[in-house]
Every structure is written in C-alpha cells, then in structure tokens.
Image (tube, rainbow, N blue to C red):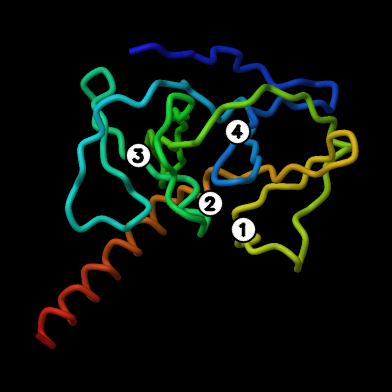
Amino acid sequence: MNQLIITDDKKSKTGVAQYLTFQAGDETFAIEILDVKEIIEIEAITKVPMMPAFIVGIINLRGRVVPVVDLSKRLGRRSSIVTKKSCIVLVEVNHDDDSQPIGMMVDEVDEILEIAESHTQPPPDFGTDLRTDFIRAMGRVDEKFIVLLDVNHVLSVDDISALSHLEDSQSAALAEEQ
C-alpha cells in the first residue's frame, strides 16, 4: 500500500499555516496539514451494513479498524466515483478525551498551500450550501476562496453515531409499515 506520511507537527509561528487541498465532488477544499496523519491509496474497503450513506466502509490500517467517509457525500454532494486519483486522507478526530482515526475518501489530492492568517476570513453566514460549523474559515488564494474545513465537525463521531441511530430507527419504521 503506497502512502505519504505527514510528520511535520510544528505549528508555524509566523501566522502562516499549511493546508492540504483536495477535490471532493466538483469543488476544492482544504484542511490544515497538522490534521493530516497519512494519505493512502484506496485498496480494499469492507462495506458495513446499516451505516449512514456517506460511510463507505472500513479499512484495516496496520491492524486497526478505520472507518472511511465519502467526503463528497458527507458534504451533501453526489457520491464519489473511485478513480486512479482517488485516495484516503487519514485524520484523527477528537472524541471525548480520545482521538479516533477516520479516513476521508477524496477524489484527488492537489497540493499543500501556505495561507497567511491575514488571508482567512470567518465562514459566511449565508450563501453556502455547507453547514457553517463544517467550515473553519475561508482562505483567500490569489483571487479565489477555498473552503477550509473543520475536520472535528465534518467527521464528528457524535454526529455520525446519531445519524446511524436515526437511520436504524427509520429502517425499523419502514419495516413495520410493510
């Protein structure tokens, strides 16, 4: 399994942060490079029944079970189509006093950008079809903006668990009606 391991865990003191940019659906998003643990090729993903639609399954990463989320689907877009450029961006999401590794399936990893804090703005109150708590900030690069995602909200273990229970309840209600 080919992989890229991100080892730089020193935060910049110059007011400039590094972001990994990637494609999910037809859009470019970014997350802070310090949130990225690895980038791995998509190989065998095991489907798990009765999961929310955006959870594509689980992978075995060095003996550890890691859930994989279709980021495009999680953001309310169409499901990703796996191609040669598709990959899994492994992040760790904070949950209670622990962290949970989660894989984000993305269509393509682009590049690492440095964005000065002075070139970021808070998420807009309107005009976006993303939940505002999913957006850490808007980063200005040249004349365009890139959505800087907050992985702890996009991949919230509590949200995913609640959605799973909701879908279980809906499935049970549908089964009773039939």
- Where does residue 29 sit, x and y in percent of width and height? 64, 41
On residue 153, the disc is 2
Q: In which quarter of the image is the N terminus?
A: top left
Q: Residue flagged by tag 2: what amino acid is it?
A: His
On residue 154, the disc is none
Dot 3 crowding, Cα within 10 Å, few <14, some 14–19, many 20+: many
Q: Residue flagged by tag 3: what amino acid is it?
A: Val
* Residue corresponding to mark 4: 22
Q: Do the residues labelled 1 and 3 touch (CB within 8 Å)?
A: no
In the rendered view, would you say 36 is above or below 72?
above
Q: Quadrant of the C terminus?
A: bottom left
In the rendered view, would you say 142 is above or below 164?
above
* Residue corresponding to mark 1: 133
Left or right: 135 in relation to 56: right
| Disc number lying in front (2 or 3) | 3
Does dot 1 land on a helix, a strand or a loop?
Answer: helix
- Where does residue 19 sit, x and y in percent of width and height? 68, 29
Left or right: 167 in relation to 14: left
Looking at marks 2 and 3 on the same chain, the residue that comes earlier in the sequence is marked by 3
Q: How far apart are marks 3 and 4 (CA)?
A: 16 Å
Q: Residue flagged by tag 4: what amino acid is it?
A: Phe
* Residue corresponding to mark 3: 68
Q: How far apart are marks 2 and 3 (CA)?
A: 15 Å
Q: How far apart are marks 1 and 3 (CA)?
A: 21 Å
Residue found at x 21% / y 68%:
168
